[in-house]
Structures are given as structure tokens and as C-alpha cells.
Image (spheres, grey):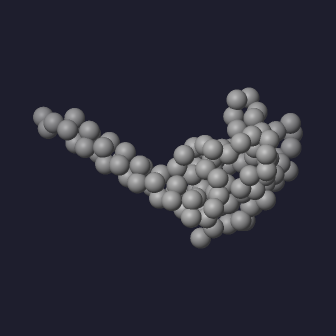
Amino acid sequence: MPNTTGRLRSGIRQWASQAHAEAVDLQRDVVKAGCLCIADAPDRTPVTVQGTLRTVTLRPRGGVPALEAELYDGTGTITVLWLGRRRIAGIFPGRAIRVTGRIGVHNGTRVLYNPRYDLRY
């Protein structure tokens, strides 16, 4: 019987080092663009943050369609929510984006409602 534990640990270490390298690259891009890091962005104040969309989900709220996305910049995540939208051209997982708006807290989660956005390349 082959020893799979060593290969599993090696694979986990490789994945973790890739994830760390991606986080460092995202943080570098945020600083270069002159944006705030999500972890440092204050609540209830106009902010501009940028990062990569991890997930994009259609999640109706109160009977109204809502497009919900998780934005990650290497320091943290924030939920971006467009109310009344089923889809937005160019918004998909893995897409780099810059958003501007006020961060609020809903049920313990930091949320940016209906932000202005710029698609990054």
C-alpha cells in the first residue's frame, strides 16, 4: 500500500504557498493603485478598494433580485451587493475589480451596497 500521507502534506504545502503568493501579489496591486486595503478600510466612510472576485451569486433579498460577490484583496474580504440586478456584464469569479462606496455591516458581515465599479485587467 503506497504512503499517501506524505504526498497529501506536500500538496497542501504547495497549495498554501501558492495562495500566500497570490495574496502578496494582490496586496502589491492594491498599494500600487493607491487604494485602501480591505482590512484597513473604515466602515461608514466613502472608500475605494480593489481585488479579485472570489464568488458571484444571485441571491434575492426581500423578493428583489440581488447580485452578491465576495471581493478579496489579500488582506481580507468584503461582500459587494448590487440590489435589483440579476447579472452585470464582466462580473464573474476571478475578475479583478475596483469598487467605491460606503462599507456597512449587516449581520456581522461587512457589505458594500450598490458600489461604483471599474473592471480591471
* Quadrant in which the C terminus appears: bottom right
Q: Is residue 38 left or right of residue 75?
A: right
Q: Is residue 81 above or below residue 117?
A: above
In front of the other: 59 or 17: 17
* Residue 16 in view: yes
Q: Is residue 6 left or right of residue 89?
A: left
In front of the other: 101 or 14: 101
Q: Is residue 4 above or below residue 115?
A: above
* Quadrant in which the N terminus appears: top left
Q: Is residue 10 left or right of residue 102?
A: left
* Residue 53 in view: no
* Residue, far left: 1
Q: Is residue 50 left or right of residue 19?
A: right
Residue 61 picture location, percent across and down: 82, 39
Residue 47 picture location, percent across and down: 74, 52
In front of the other: 90 or 76: 76
Q: How many marks?
A: 0
Residue 117 picture location, percent across and down: 74, 61
Residue 9 picture location, percent across and down: 26, 39
* Residue, far top: 107
The residue depicted at 64 percent of the width and 53 percent of the height is: 36
Tell me the quarter of the picture where residue 6 sits.
top left
The residue depicted at 67 percent of the width and 49 percent of the height is: 69
The residue depicted at 30 percent of the width and 43 percent of the height is: 13
The residue depicted at 58 percent of the width and 58 percent of the height is: 30
